[in-house]
Image (tube, grey):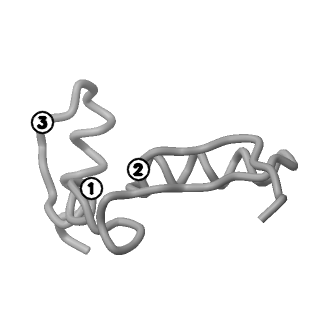
Amino acid sequence: MGESTDAVVVGAGVIGSSIALELARSGLRVVVVDKFGGAGNGSTSASSAVVRFTYPTIAGVKAAWESRHC
């Protein structure tokens, strides 16, 4: 006890973890809280497990198509 926190990030998914990392890199003391047991266990835990082709740009679609074959 007795320590202070500069920022609290709610959610340890991809976005929350990224925000927490950048805040910590800038020198802030960060606490991350999440209702699940660990980082990436929520709704974003499998968000990159599929290849999709519905990107808003042609470059995004081309990158997905090329990645499909790797």
Give, as a three-letter code, the residue at label 1.
Answer: Thr
Disc 2 versus disc 1: nearer the observer: 2
Residue drawn at (47%, 56%) of the image:
33
Residue positioned most to the front: 1
Where does label 1 land, which residue? 44
* Sequence-first tag of 1 and 3: 1
Of mark 2 and mark 1, the one earlier in the sequence is 2
Mark 2 residue type: Gly
Question: Taking 41 as reference, is 47 above or below it?
Answer: above
Amino acid tagged 3: Thr
- What residue do we see at 55% from left, 51% from top? 18
Q: Residues within 10 Å of mark 3 (few under 14, many from 20)?
A: few
Occupied quadrant, residue 13: bottom left
Between 47 and 68, the one lying in front of the other is 47
Residue carrying label 3: 54
Q: Secondary structure at mark 2?
A: loop
Q: How busy is the neighbourhood of tag 2: few (under 14 within 10 Å), some, or many (20 plus)?
A: many
Report the mark closest to the observer, 1 or 3.
Answer: 1
Residue 37: x, y in percent? Answer: 33, 74
Q: In the rendering, at what x and y percent does residue 68 appear?
A: 18, 64
In three-dimensional space, the C-alpha distance between marks 2 and 1, rounded to whole angstroms, equals 10 Å
